[in-house]
Amino acid sequence: MYLYFFQKLVIHAHQTTPHLSIPMNDESYDFDDDKEAVKFHRLYAEQGDAEAQFNLGQMYREGLEVAQNYKEAVKWYRLSAEQGDARAQCDLGMMYDKGQGVEQDYKEAEKLFRLAAEQGIAEAQGNLGVMYHEGLGVEQDYKEAVKWNRLAAEQGIAEAQGNLGVLYEKGKGVPQDYKEAVKWYRFAAEQEYAEAQCNLGVMYYEGYGVEQDYKEAVKWWKLAAEQEKALAQCNLGVLYEKGKGVQQDHKEAVKWYRFAAEQGHAGAQTYLGEMYHEGLGVEQDYKEAVKWYRLAAEQRNEGAEVNLAIMYDEGLN
């Protein structure tokens, strides 16, 4: 009986970023002494100053010169949000979304994101777009997802640009348009957003919305892989093994498969098992092959399950 090797394919995973709840980027910490900043913000926050309350909330959330305390962060964000501070509304929504300092409550998160989004806060618009895409706290509505992601994307939020690319690629809430998907992926990828770099690599690999170009696929996957994006690491390994867009190099393929496999990527674990079984880029080692097949099989990877069964049948364990 021969080992059944599944054809190594680039693995597609075009999907929205997991619900991020994008925090505000605050630029108000201009103090030479952070302890002095805490003292200053607390003084004014206790007098009801909304901006100081927001800043104090951020300090507690991040643990900046105070012990990190989500409940305290929520307290100060809420006081600021109740005065209409859009930044505090956005970040309080994030706390509800993540269940930090409060019980997780998507409906409350959506309500707060909307208040901030309607005041033009890009991070809140992006978060609201994801909530509509995923149906979190609202009825799933791809058109609304497109609307809010676009508003955030046009303000330069990389996650929203990447998610808008997904919606165009999949034709959800808009007519399917690969060129438009590539456009938004590129905007996000150029901001070093790993999800978008990974998806842009797939577009070049497949020739969706662009001319097929394996070298460009390598370029974008390498950028994402260097940010420890497991899918990109696995796909980069495939290209090195096949010699597409790069010179064939089994050792380099093994390197990238290993990076992804150690993050638990089942496809990469299967491919790494095959490299050990065949002795490609590594010394042939059946025990290592079995080890990686087993890890992938435990995730119900079909190729790993078949190969593992054959290795046991032939006593190669």
Image (cartoon, rainbow, N blue to C red):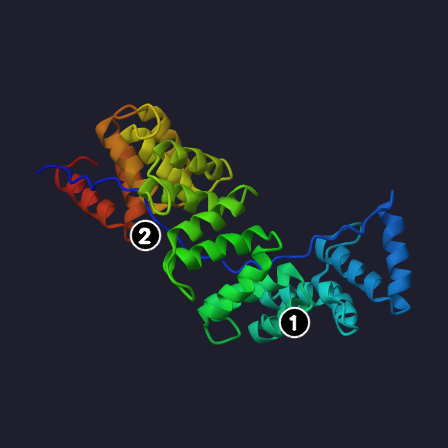
Residue at 30%, 24% (x, y): give it: 248
Residue at 46%, 57% (x, y): give it: 16
Tag 1 near tag 2, CB within 8 Å: no
The residue lying toward the viewer, choosing from 116 and 32, is: 116
The residue lying toward the viewer, choosing from 72 and 251, is: 251
Residue 182 location in percent, x, y? 43, 48
| Residue with the mark numbered 1 | 112
Circle 1: element type: helix
| Image: 108 above or below 228 | below
Task: Report crowding for label 2: few under 14, some 14 to 19, many 20 or more residues within 10 A (C-alpha).
Answer: some
| Residue 17 visible here | no
Residue 68's label in the rendered image is none
Nearer the observer, disc 1 or disc 2? 1
Quarter residue 264 falls in: top left
Amino acid under disc 1? Leu
| Residue 179 visible here | yes
Could you tell whether 200 is left or right of 296 in the image?
right
Residue 293 location in percent, x, y? 27, 42
Residue 299's label in the rendered image is 2
Amino acid under disc 2? Gln
Q: Quadrant of the C terminus?
A: top left
Residue at 79%, 58% (x, y): give it: 55
The residue lying toward the viewer, choosing from 255 and 187, is: 187
Circle 2: element type: loop
Which comes sooner in the sequence, label 1 or label 2? 1
The residue lying toward the viewer, choosing from 75 and 225, is: 225
Residue 309 location in percent, x, y? 17, 45
Could you tell whether 165 is left or right of 273 in the image?
right
Could you tell whether 312 is left or right of 102 in the image?
left
Specify the farthest residue to the left: 1
Quarter residue 97 falls in: bottom right
Q: In which quarter of the image is the N terminus?
A: top left
